[in-house]
Image: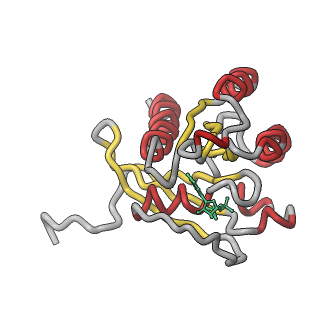
Amino acid sequence: MSGYKADDEYDYLFKLVLIGDSGVGKSNLLSRFTKNEFNLESKSTIGVEFATKTLNIHAKIIKAQIWDTAGQERYRAITSAYYRGAVGALLVYDVTRSSTFETAGRWLKELRDHTDPNIVVMLIGNKSDLRHLVSVSTEDGKAFAEKESLYFMETSALEATNVENAFTEVLTQIYHIVSKRSV
Ligand code: GDP
């Protein structure tokens, strides 16, 4: 077996969770990042799902296991198992629907109630391609992120803008924390 590198070899496995109101684009951010796919139809599947992607960060092989609520947030039925072991989170709102931004505080509280204080959290204003419909300004997103010590980015899963950047930034920050801890 020498010289053979298994598909599943990695240096670190990081669990990330996607949170935020229904319809903000969580599933599409995940499929854009892991499969470079986008779906116009909102899927109705119920049940937690995850996808994985392996990438290189600072010469380490990082496997990201990214969990999607897959519709359960509609019933506020996300269980503690969803959050368990998460080291990073993307808290997503829709820049065209301010109600999804107003609930960000509640999502953050639920996340923090269930996870380690060191968790890396990025606030994501998704659907930035719908410029004429924007109802949450970049400044408001930034201000909330600063107040809560979150990273912040605006993305478009549709146009593939900043999606890779957002996930990679979260994973890189997690790597910095974890690699410091182990020296
Ligand atoms: P989820 O419920 O948070 O997982 O949201 P989905 O990923 O199912 O997306 C909800 C709807 O928003 C779908 O109709 C998507 O096609 C649409 N959508 C998701 N991301 C974007 C985006 O970046 N731009 C636009 N214009 N539509 C998006």
Residue 132 versus residue 104: which sits nearer the camera? 132
Residue 19 versus residue 81: which sits nearer the camera? 19
Is there any visible trace of residue 121 in the rendered image?
no
Q: Is residue 22 above or below residue 119?
A: below
Indicate the position of residue 74 as horizontal and vertical percent values.
82, 65
Q: Is residue 67 left or right of residue 3?
A: right
Q: Is residue 91 left or right of residue 56?
A: right
Quarter of the rendering containing residue 150: top right
Residue 179 versus residue 174: which sits nearer the camera? 174
Residue plotted at (44% across, 40% down): 165
Indicate the position of residue 126 as horizontal and vertical percent values.
60, 45
Indicate the position of residue 53 as horizontal and vertical percent values.
42, 59
Is there any visible trace of residue 131 in the rendered image?
yes
Q: Is residue 39 left or right of residue 98?
A: left
Residue plotted at (75% across, 60% down): 22
Quarter of the rendering containing residue 118: top right
Colour theme: secondary structure
- Quadrant into which the C terminus falls: top left
Quarter of the rendering containing residue 72: bottom right
- Quadrant into which the N terminus falls: bottom left
Indicate the position of residue 113 as horizontal and vertical percent values.
83, 44
